[in-house]
Image (cartoon, grey):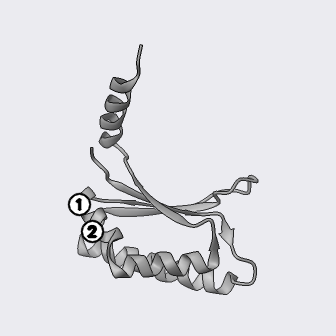
Amino acid sequence: MSTNAIHFGWNRTVPGREGTSAAHFEEFVQYLGGLQQQGSIMSFEVVLLNPHGGDLNGFFLIRGDGAKLTELVQSDEWLTHMMRAALHLEGSGAVMGATGDAVMERMKLWSSLISS
């Protein structure tokens, strides 16, 4: 089953750590830009959600080849960024998923499992 995206989301900055979060955000954007230039990822997008009372207030959507993304999330550099984020962001986490054509693959599987 194809996986072609990573969703890295968070709730909010831990109070008192706003400066750390702002600096890490810039570093992470630079890191992803470098990965894109190297061809390790195809693209990334940052989404900051409007205030809504929920527990997801922003995320990065990182797109790429499934094998390269799997390799990425196992790298020391990725794990370091995730551990740093956990120290200054509430509810931070990353999960792999499917976008685009891969969604139809997933839906086909899902549909085949539904009992009529």
For label 1, count other residues whose C-alpha is less than 10 Å away and answer few (under 14), some (14-19) or many (20+): few
Q: Residue at x 76, y 54 (%)?
A: 53
Numbered label attached to residue 81:
none
Label 2: which residue?
Answer: 71
Element on which disc 2 rests: helix
| Residue 27 to residue 53: above or below | below
Where on the picture, by quarter, is residue 39?
bottom left
Can residue 65 be seen here? no
Q: Position of residue 68 (x, y in %)?
A: 25, 64
Residue nearest the viewer, comparing 26 with 20:
20
**Quarter of the view holding residue 110:** top left
Percent coordinates x, y for residue 17 in the rendering: 69, 83
Evaluate if marks 2 and 1 touch, with contact meaning CB atoms under 8 Å apart: yes
Tag 1 residue: 67
SS for callout 1: helix
Q: Real-space Cα distance between discs 2 and 1?
A: 6 Å
- Residue at 62% x, 86% y is 20
Residue 87 seen anywhere in this rendered image of the structure: yes
In which quadrant of the rendered image does the N terminus lie? top left
15 lies above or below 54: below
The amino acid marked with disc number 2 is Glu
- Residue 89 as seen in the image, left or right of residue 84: right
At 41% from the left edge and 18% from the top edge, which residue is drawn? 115
Q: Quadrant of the C terminus?
A: top left
Q: Nearer the viewer, residue 99 or 11?
A: 11
Give the image location of residue 41, x and y in percent.
Answer: 30, 66
Please give the name of the residue rendered at 48% of the width and 75% of the height, measured from the top-left corner. 82
Query: 24 or 87, which is in the foreground?
Result: 87
Above or below residue 26? Residue 62 is above
Q: Is residue 60 left or right of residue 4?
A: right
Q: Amino acid at mark 1?
A: Ala
